[in-house]
Amino acid sequence: MSIPTHMDTHVEPGVDKFDPDKLEVAPGRTRESVEGWIPELATEEELRGALEKAFDYRGDVTLTKKDGNKLEGYIFDRVTGANLSTSFIRILPKDSTSRQKIAYSDIAALVFSGRDPAAGKSWEAWVKKYWEKKASGGQGGSLHPDVLE
């Protein structure tokens, strides 16, 4: 059995471009603001795209169903099927504790009506505010999370 006389010096391509000691915050994904948005729902693709954004949204939305009834609440689940009739969202209405299931095919309009409680509360914004407080010698330079409401 032979003993290797050198260390494996293989380095993955691109590894040398990032110095972890110099990175304060790792790059993240950009979240677009949809608060107040009224999407156009003319096509199946537009409806599906808007409902995906509504599922990711942290605030309430207002749905207008094809029968004219409106419902405001938080979309907490969705199932995407082969067509609009087999796809549905589950919503927790603002004025009720009963959860409702609504088929995509029953939705006529959608408004991102509620305030996004986490808007402006990104990790990067928190770190910036933390260091500003520390630098000014002010109170509040702690590692405790902000209150959302």
Image (tube, helix red, strand yellow):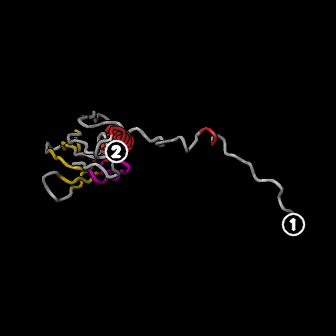
* Front one among 51 and 122: 122
Q: Nearer the viewer, mark 1 or mark 2?
A: 1
Indicate left or right for 107 with 11 as reference: left
Other-residue count near label 2 (Cα within 10 Å), few / some / many at <14 / 14–19 / ≥20: some
* Span highlighted in magenta in the image: 75-88
**Distance from Cα at disc 1 to Cα at disc 2:** 59 Å
In percent of width and height, residue 64 lies at: 18, 42
How many residues crowd mark 1 within 10 Å: few (<14), some (14–19), many (20+)? few
The count of marks equals: 2
Q: Residue furthest right?
A: 1
Amino acid carrying label 2: it is: Glu
Q: Nearer the viewer, residue 4 or 60?
A: 4
According to the picture, the residue beneath numbered tag 1 turns out to be 1
> In which quadrant of the rendered view does residue 39 lie?
top left
Amino acid type assigned to the residue bearing label 1 in the image: Met
Residue found 21% across the figure and 48% down from its top? 149
Quick one: SS at disc 1?
loop
* The stretch drawn in magenta includes residue 87: yes
Residue 52's disc is 2
Can residue 32 be seen by looking at this rendering? yes
Q: Position of residue 131 (x, y in %)?
A: 38, 41
Q: Is residue 39 magenta?
A: no
Where disc 2 sits, the SS reads helix
User: Where residue 101 sits in the image (x, y, percent)?
Assistant: 24, 55
Camera-side residue of 117 and 44:
117
Q: Residue at x 35, y 47 (%)?
A: 83
Q: Of 108 and 71, which appears nearest the observer?
A: 71
Residue 77 pos. (x, y %): 30, 54
